[in-house]
Image (cartoon, rainbow, N blue to C red):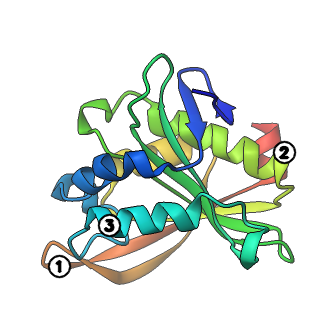
């Protein structure tokens, strides 16, 4: 397998239809869905295939504004998750970053921080972005620690902005500017 990007422990490539089964299964897990802003409805393999087909093209094709990578451990072909830059604005030079690691046994090993580093480097050095931001459930302590370690700063709080597991949860906005990231 040829990787588009690499980090210390991970490879990154475009999403592939062959991974649809893994992602469909991973997205059924409530532990994984809980911190995704999309996880309120069941996922089908057909739906995942269609999503992957749409996101395997570069953003210059058909006016798309997302660049999505599937990632996994070097030396293994099995994916661990997806990460991408979404709503890319070439006028404002910003994008929203998102990640999910679909194998909970790999949580807490610094992979989220490593993925963040690779995608920030890609966004700033390859796409020439100025700012990359994210939204995270305010009670996702593990994610927030990883994002802060990667250089993201708290920018604001949207009170009771999302409904998760029967209650409203605050949504923390975080961002990092290219100059801040380079200094860090």
Disc number for residue 167: 1
Residue that label 2 marks: 125
N-terminal label among 1 and 3: 3
**Residue 90 figure quarter:** bottom right
Query: What is the x, y in percent for residue 128?
Result: 87, 55
- Do we see residue 134 in this rendering? no
- Could you classify mark 1 by the number of other residues whose Cα lies within 10 Å: few (under 14), some (14-19), or many (20 or more)? few
* Image quadrant in which the C terminus is located: top right
Disc number for residue 128: none
Count every numbered label the image shows and give the total: 3
Secondary element under disc 3, as helix, strand or loop, is helix
Query: What is the x, y in percent for residue 118?
Result: 65, 38
- Could you classify mark 2 by the number of other residues whose Cα lies within 10 Å: few (under 14), some (14-19), or many (20 or more)? few
Farthest residue to the left: give it: 166
* Image quadrant in which the N terminus is located: top right
Please state which of residues 132 and 11 is positioned toward the viewer in this rendering: 11
Residue that label 3 marks: 46
The residue shown at (24%, 31%) is 105
């Amino acid at each position: 397998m040829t990787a588009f990007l690499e980090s210390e422990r991970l490879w990154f490539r475009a999403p592939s239809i062959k991974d649809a089964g893994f992602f469909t299964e991973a997205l059924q897990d409530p532990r994984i869905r809980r911190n995704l802003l999309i996880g309120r409805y069941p996922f089908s393999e057909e739906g995942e295939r269609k999503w992957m087909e749409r996101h395997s093209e570069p953003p210059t094709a058909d006016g798309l504004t997302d660049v999505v990578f599937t990632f996994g451990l070097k030396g293994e072909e099995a994916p661990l998750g997806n990460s991408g830059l979404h709503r890319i604005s070439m006028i404002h030079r910003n994008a929203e970053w998102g990640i999910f690691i679909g194998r909970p046994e790999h949580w807490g090993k610094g992979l989220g921080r490593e993925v963040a580093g690779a995608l920030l480097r890609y966004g700033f050095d390859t796409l020439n972005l100025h700012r990359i931001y994210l939204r995270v459930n305010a009670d996702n302590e593990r994610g927030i620690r990883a994002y802060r370690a990667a250089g993201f700063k708290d920018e604001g709080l949207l009170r009771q902005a999302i409904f998760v597991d029967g209650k409203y949860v605050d949504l923390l906005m975080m961002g990092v500017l290219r100059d801040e990231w380079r200094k860090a």
